[in-house]
Image (cartoon, rainbow, N blue to C red):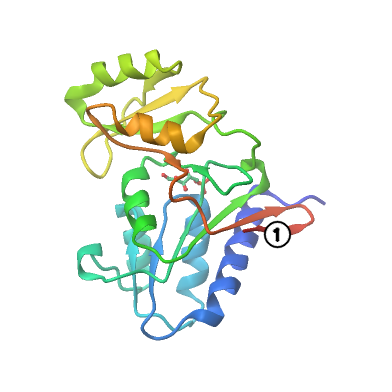
Amino acid sequence: MSKTQDELKREVAQAALDFIAPHLTPASMLGIGTGSTANEFINLLGTSGLPFSGTVASSEASAQRLRDFGIPVLDLSLVDSLQFYIDGADEANGALELIKGGGAALTREKIVAAASEFFVCIADESKEVATLGKFPLPIEVIPMAENIVINALRAMGGRPEVREGVITDNRNIIIDVHDFMIADPKATETAINQITGVVCNGLFAHRGADLLLLSGQTGVRSLR
Ligand code: 5RP
């Protein structure tokens, strides 16, 4: 019988926990991501009994889930560095470049990833692609800049759509760019960041993952 999506998420979350466990000490600080795969990781971390001192979360939702397990959640401004960041992705390529932000947490995710020494990305293998961009690229935008950002993204060849009913933890809007195959993720990440009004885009290419764990029907694959 084939494994369900939930089983695949649990399996890859367990693989991430097994990977970081030997490196943890009572002083370890962890960055924790957002989404259903990250939630599986929180569930396992919360009952693991492993030594670590606390976490920084990439969203209010993850912070609440961590606190529900009695795990300390700190503000990033109080932390010098994070030993590991564990988070999911919407797409990943073989160069460990990612699209993230399906859960609208991309800006905080990018900040926590930047503060982390080692980023473990966890996903099931349906997220693996040769070329990024089939998943609409999320972009966090200051609300008053909606129109100028949409026009600039159209000029770049994408089909931008405002994500209806979504306001980020930073009180901004999300624009998803459809039909945007991304041949050069680093160049595209840089170019979108140049559009005035863009807070952050969901390409994690300049700071991609350090380790990509992908669960599938035959087990967990590891890409570095
Ligand atoms: C949230 C994210 C998530 O990591 C991404 O959407 C994957 O989520 P899931 O594990 O639920 O598939 O970037 O902003």
Q: Is residue 147 above or below residue 15?
A: above
| Residue 169 horizontal/vertical position (percent) | 26, 45
Q: Which residue is mark 1?
A: 220
The answer to whether 8 appears left or right of 151 in the picture is right
| Residue 200 horizontal/vertical position (percent) | 31, 38
Res 93 quadrant in image:
top right
Q: Residue at 56% of width from left, 55% of height from top?
A: 122
Q: Is residue 212 above or below residue 137?
A: below
User: SS class of the residue under badge 1?
Assistant: strand
Of the pair 28 and 13, the residue shown nearer to us: 28
Q: Residue at 49% of width from left, 76% of height from top?
A: 47
Task: Specify the quadrant that holds the C terminus.
Answer: bottom right
| Residue 179 horizontal/vertical position (percent) | 52, 19
Of the pair 203 and 163, the residue shown nearer to us: 203
The answer to whether 92 appears left or right of 136 in the picture is right
Res 165 quadrant in image:
top left
